[in-house]
């Protein structure tokens, strides 16, 4: 019988373990950074990178903070290579 997240030997997949840690807000934040892009609610990719770094610095308490992002300045090209972002929290 197939059960999502459970491997043939009965162990949980890494994704399921990390999902549980995120829901319960426990575990090593550093170990999850490779799978966390940043919260999409703060805006585009640059703001997400900033938000991810702040999660790394502040730990699980960071998820309880209200936050809003805005672009202060950005490369004017069709494919921006830089941006100045402000993340208010």
Image (tube, rainbow, N blue to C red):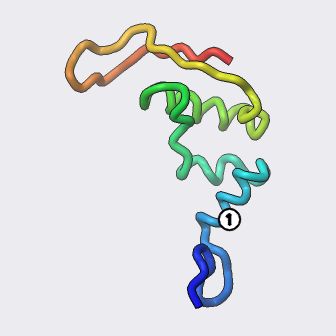
Residue at the image point whose x is 66% and y is 37% from the top? 56
Q: Name the spot of residue 18 as percent of width and height, x first.
A: 66, 59
What is the number of callouts on the image? 1
**Location of residue 23 with respect to 76 vertically, above or below:** below
Work out which quarter of the rendered image holds the C terminus and state it: top right
What is the secondary structure assignment of the residue under circle 1?
helix
Work out which quarter of the rendered image holds the N terminus and state it: bottom right
Q: Which residue is mark 1?
A: 17
**Location of residue 36 with respect to 21 vertically, above or below:** above
Is 50 left or right of 10, judged from the image as shown? left
Residue at the image point whose x is 21% and y is 18% from the top? 77
Foreground residue among 13 and 58: 13
Q: Name the spot of residue 3 as percent of width and height, x first.
A: 60, 81
Is 71 left or right of 86, judged from the image as shown? left
Residue at the image point whose x is 76% and y is 54% from the top? 27
Is 71 left or right of 64, judged from the image as shown? left
Q: Name the spot of residue 86 as percent of width and height, x first.
A: 54, 14
**Location of residue 19 with respect to 70 vertically, above or below:** below
Q: From this viewpoint, which residue is outermost toward the front? A: 1
Q: Name the spot of residue 2 as percent of width and height, x first.
A: 57, 85
Which of the 4 quarters of the picture holds residue 87? top right
Q: From this viewpoint, which residue is outermost toward the top? A: 72
Badge 1: how crowded within 10 Å, few (<14), some, or many (20+)? few
Foreground residue among 58 and 20: 20
Q: From this viewpoint, which residue is outermost toward the left? A: 78
Foreground residue among 44 and 14: 44
Residue at the image point whose x is 25% and y is 13% from the top? 76
């Amino acid at each position: 019988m197939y059960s999502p997240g459970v491997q043939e030997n009965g162990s949980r997949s890494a994704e399921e373990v990390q999902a549980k840690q995120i829901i319960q807000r426990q575990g090593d934040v550093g170990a999850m950074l490779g799978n966390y892009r940043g919260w999409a609610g703060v805006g585009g990719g640059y703001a997400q990178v900033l938000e991810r770094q702040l999660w790394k610095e502040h730990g699980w308490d960071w998820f309880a903070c209200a936050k809003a992002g805005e672009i202060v300045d950005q490369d004017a090209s069709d494919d921006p290579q830089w941006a100045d972002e402000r993340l208010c929290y």
